[in-house]
Amino acid sequence: MPQRQLESGMMFNGEGRKEAMKKGRIKVMLGNEACVEAALLAGCRFYGGYPITPATEILEIMSRRLPLVDGLCLQMEDEIAALVAVVGASWGGTKAMTATSGPGFCLMQEAIGLAVAVEAPCVIVNVMRGGPASGQSTSTAQGDLYQARYGSNGDYSLIVLCPSTAQEMFDHTIKAFNLSERFRIPVIILSDEVVGHIREKVFIPDADQLTFVERKVPTVPREEFVIFKPEENGVPLMPTFNTGYKSPVISQAKSLNGNRGNAKEAVENIHRLVSKIEDHMDEFAEVQVYGDDKAETAFVTFGSVCRAARSAVDMGKEKGLAIRSVEVKTVWPFPDDLVRRALAGAKRIVVAEMNLGMIQREIERVIRQPEIKIELFSKIGGIYPQPQEFLRFLEEKR
Amino acid sequence: MNPLGEKYLRKEFLPFLFCPGCGDGMIVQAFLQAVDDLGCIDDLALTAGIGCSAWIGVYMNVDILKVLHGRAIPAAIGLKATQPSRKVVTFTGDGDCLAIGGNHLLHAARRNIDMTVVMVNNQIYAMTGGQVAPSTVVGSKTQTTPYGNIEKQLDGCKIALAAGATMVSRWSTAHLKPLIKTFKNALNHKGFSYIEIMSQCPVQTGRYLLGSGSPQFNLQWLKDHCVKEEDPSRWLEVESQGKIPVGDFLRIEQPEFMEEVQRMNQRVKEEQGKGGDR
């Protein structure tokens, strides 16, 4: 798959920007709105949802837009039903998605495991809010980072993208659909209240400027087709229901022909479900560096916190402070190598996140150099960090 | 092998995981008979949740999506929504449909989405080893009601009727002929149909609640206790005698969900074409 089109912000920031910008339009929109815009462009025609702040706009806008393109937006009875219906729609042959926030994301965990197990491509947006439980419905937070990766039962892997701007809500949604179809997995867009509710300029390229990935379907006669036998890239072909393949798709540990599997087959299946993603991270893993990439002081950020950190880098520069901000765009599977490279030469690493230290643990795991301090600049309670606070943190904790 | 089995079963998946004497095999046969009579095997898309009855569709050579406990109905909705020409059928059990999946039943029925729910009621959680279910008779001693069940039964047919299903029937594995006819009606019904089948579980319900693990005894119990009574005003009387009313309770025509969706999409697009409000 061409790497270029998948990279977020490329259309807006990359080379040939001027040329590319002629083939599209610019609109001021909500992050959540940008997500819908991209989903419809990517071909999403089924949305199963349930109202929850701060993700509701996605459901509302989908309910207005999908009928116009012969799609269906269904407000289900709960988030469990929402995601299960999405999995059904996916096997039905349609690109499908849902969006939610903390408590709804909790309910979706079982169906995330389901989507992984039955290898149903789909996109799940979690516009994070404060937790635990009902928490702070209108406030931002980044406390669902582990839940997005480890929330369902058993061993598995999936891809989690973290947008920091309305533009990235757009770009990551296109990327999420492409990756879900490429790997036949649920892809999670881990946004947060700030990104979901920010209203800013978004460049919407014409559809012919984007690359869209579609799942591969079998073409061999049914007798020769083995439903869960992987292709060379680890991903089996996906026959849409009612196209003659009479597929047995079960959520149990299974053998290649779809029947209940023995222990050996279960082991092989789990390893394949993980390796089909983690062996191909170079196709999608993304880490950006903002500021002076040789600076000894580095912030590590993801999601909306990237924004304040960028301002802090700029403010530091004015004061003569060299800082780099390492922005993790694909948080899971954690891009160890890219992060290590982005942090090479850094003497002081400050992980800034709106939780009590989640990415921090990953950085501690990846940067195992005792002489390098890995500090945590944490903000919780829905209080978004101010750029000045980053600089104050650097001064006070010195 | 039975010619229906020869024609429609996924032979590489056999033997069935059902216990000897289970009613599920009878339901497989009755359903395949109905499908064969209608010639609609290629249109079927099945879903199932978890439990013994959830495996009924897996042995049939059709597209089947077997999902999580209680979640077969929303999966069916997803399949129906993406291609309304599918005949979507969900196989579920009393625990799957009335306990963990109860909410989904209510809302699918109220939408009158064109699908068929086949609820196999053995009055117990059988696969997990005989725990009380919402359908278990008061007083029953199960693995989780060792001092007797003190909770009232939930009647799936009444729930489906109240929630807006447009076709509701209940039969038993001792009523295979009317059941086949009901299956055919349901597969042709434009709307939400709920078919409950009282079925024998000799291993759990039979041994621990009815006093015998013999399949013959359990089938006879169903024959004796399932009484044809299609007039709801007489159900209380039937139930007061410890009997279960069976029959075809309701079959009416009402606007079907996916047809309404298509109508709405058409209308909205026409309005947009005229420059109407978005």
Image (tube, coloured by chain):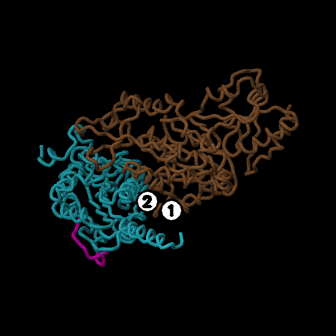
Chain A: drawing colour: brown
Q: Quadrant of residue A338?
A: top right
Chain B: drawing colour: cyan
Q: Residue B99, how many percent across, how many down?
A: 42, 57
Q: Quadrant of the N terminus of chain B?
A: top left
Residue A350 in sight: no
Report the Cα–Cα distance between label 1 and label 2.
8 Å
Magenta stretch encompasses residue A99: no
Q: Amino acid at mark 1?
A: Arg
Residue A142 in sight: yes
Name the residue rendered at 70%, 43% in the picture: A355
Q: Residues within 10 Å of mark 2 (few under 14, many from 20)?
A: many
A357 to the left or right of A87: right
Segment tinted magenta in the rendering: B226-236
Q: Which residue is mark 1?
A: A65
| CB contact under 8 Å: marks 1 and 2 | yes
Name the residue rendered at 20%, 44% in the picture: B9
A53 to the left or right of B84: right
